[in-house]
Amino acid sequence: MKRGDEKRLSQRRAEAFALLRECEGLLEELVRPGPMMPGCFYGMYKKCGRAGCRCERGELHGPYPVIAATRGGRRSTRSVPADRVREVQARTEAWRGFQRKRRRLDGAMRRIAEIVKEIRDASVEEFP
């Protein structure tokens, strides 16, 4: 091991353990996610197609609450009943939050693997 490597490796170990604690916290949240719904909730504006309607001039009707999701490789948009708007909105937000946390967990785990490889490479000695 080269001079100065021990301090750098010590810093890497500390970083790895900090990332591990972050992973543990994320995992605690991810294994008990609660109700969620994949998709995107938003308000859609539409043209009705009636002759002389204001929507012909660009004043569209809406917004109508919808959820867009991909199922079986196909994108679909479905209307959300008025009595379920809050529920669907909360569950799609929970889905996005879950996905963000999962990506953070993936990134932290990749970084830990990089650090372990760096420590391994710095610790290898060649046979004389």
Image (spheres, rainbow, N blue to C red):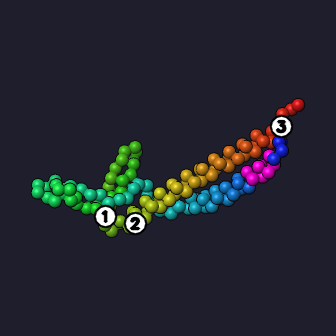
Residue drawn 52% across the image and 55% down it? 100
Mark 3, mark 1: which one is toward the viewer?
Answer: 3
Residue that carries the numbered disc 1 in the rendered image: 81
Using the image, tell me which numbered label, if any, was put on residue 125.
Answer: 3
Residue ranking furthest to the right: 128
Q: Residue furthest left?
A: 52
Label the magenta part by its dominant secondary structure.
Answer: helix
Label 2 vs 1, first from the N-terminus? 1
The residue identified by callout 2 is 87
Label 1 near label 3: C-beta < 8 Å?
no
Three-letter amino acid code at disc 3?
Glu
Q: Residue at x 45, y 61 (%)?
A: 93
The residue sitting at 70% across, 53% down in the picture is 16
Residue 9 within the segment the image draws in magenta? yes
User: Image quadrant of residue 65?
Assistant: bottom left
Mark 3 to mark 1: distance in Å?
67 Å
Q: Is residue 116 left or right of residue 31?
A: right
